[in-house]
Image: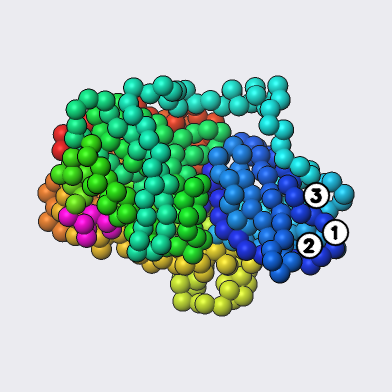
Amino acid sequence: MKTRPWNLLCYALLGAALHAQDITGDWHGTLKSSGPEFRIVIHISKGDNGALKGTFDSVDQGAKGVPLTSVTLDGSNFKFTIDVAKVTYEGKVNADTITGTWSQAQSLPLEFKRGPFEASSPTRDAQQRAHQRPQNPVKPYPYKEEEVSYDNTVQDVHLAATITIPTGAGPFPAVLLITGSGPQDRDETLPFQHKPFLVLADYLTRHGIVVLRADDRGVGKSSGNFATATTADFATDTEAGIAYLKKRPEVNVHKLGLIGHSEGGVIAPMVAARNADVSFIVLMAGPGVRGDEIIPAQLTAIMEAGGAGKQEAEKAAADERELLTLAEREKDEAVIQKKIQELSNGRTSEAQAEAQAKQIRSPWYQYFLQYDPATALEKVKCPVLAINGEKDRQVPPNQNLPAIRKALESGGNTHFEVDELPGLNHLFQTAKTGSPMEYAEIEETVSPLALEKISGWILKQ
């Protein structure tokens, strides 16, 4: 949920700039850390008023055209921010290079060079081959695949999607996949070609289930503004998908369900609680408690998985609770920024603290902090499957699965199953520690254990 460590590069911007030298055009660089590397391309241009603006592509994540939040150039000092992701980049422009620092939780050197990446090279091709995930399906598929689109007329959003339809005589049961937090494409593409929704859709369709999966609003070929939307807004996009599936002759409208991952596991009950058309829901690492409870628990779990001592992790969680308590009542970002720097004992730069304060006060974050999933879960009457990985460090199962069970029981739902799957992480990969830093290193995209569990449970319904 909140940290989204694999999703380094996916949020929104509109900017202004001073004119010193011509920085417009394409720039490319590779962000290197102790874990995976990410190729980044930024596209800088000028708006009608002459102010700088820009977008970036995360080449290895399949994200393209994501708007930046602000772009400034003062002399040779260049800066852009991505508020929701808590990213700040500051560098010096020198002819055809920009040398600077990418700051997001930690600071890493990043040099941009003018121009795009080479489309192909022996090194690049070898790198791509090395990261072709074995579970990614290869065409031709033994089922029908169709590019489609539909409209969320409530919020004027046009959604681009893929529908996959089994061979044989229908109508078939159908599901709509709902992505996790952060701007996601229809495959929920992660670093180095992990595409969990592509793998899940392929598996389910081969087992006789129609699957619809869409680019999030403002991502890929979908319209809309991702940065200003909350979880409640994304729920209306899901409802538009349900309306579309009901029109397809291949779909059995009496067996129409939702599968939500992470934040999608909040959206699915929200939609099912108010839509009798939803026949069942599957929650993959769905939260059962408020965001201001998940975040400190998440922080503790991730730090301990990364080798931090229990006392250090608990102190960080206590600081996070103090910050979130302030952020929920304080609207002045300067006050929040000051608290961030105070709690970090000077380890967080002013620019980083400013970006974090903006993120915390963003509409999505404030909604996430204060929304209690139990309010919808208690109203869900259709069958529910809730699963978490034992080693999920982002939505810890010992905190969230009992809360989901309690809410369903409180609402009188007797048609549910709650399971903790051994050895799996937040992405339902077989993992060693569950740390987000392992995600890109694991060859498996989705464990067969999870795929079989979901498919078998749906077909029983």
Along the line of sight, the residue nearer the viewer: 428 or 47: 47
Establish if 60 lies above or below 181. above
**How far apart are the alpha carbons under marks 2 and 1?**
8 Å
Is residue 169 found inside the magenta-colored segment of the image? no
Q: Is residue 394 visible?
A: no
Along the line of sight, the residue nearer the viewer: 50 or 206: 50
**How far apart are the alpha carbons under marks 1 and 3?**
12 Å
Establish if 243 lies above or below 419. below
Kind of residue at badge 1: Gln
Task: Determine the residue positioned at 36% across, 47% down.
Answer: 178
Residue highlighted by disc 2:
73
**How far apart are the alpha carbons under marks 3 and 2?**
12 Å
- Secondary structure category for the residue under label 1: loop
**Left or right of 276 in this view: 120:** right
**Left or right of 392 in this view: 112:** right
- Residue 390 lies, in percent from the top left, at 36, 38
Residue highlighted by disc 3:
98
Kind of residue at badge 3: Ile
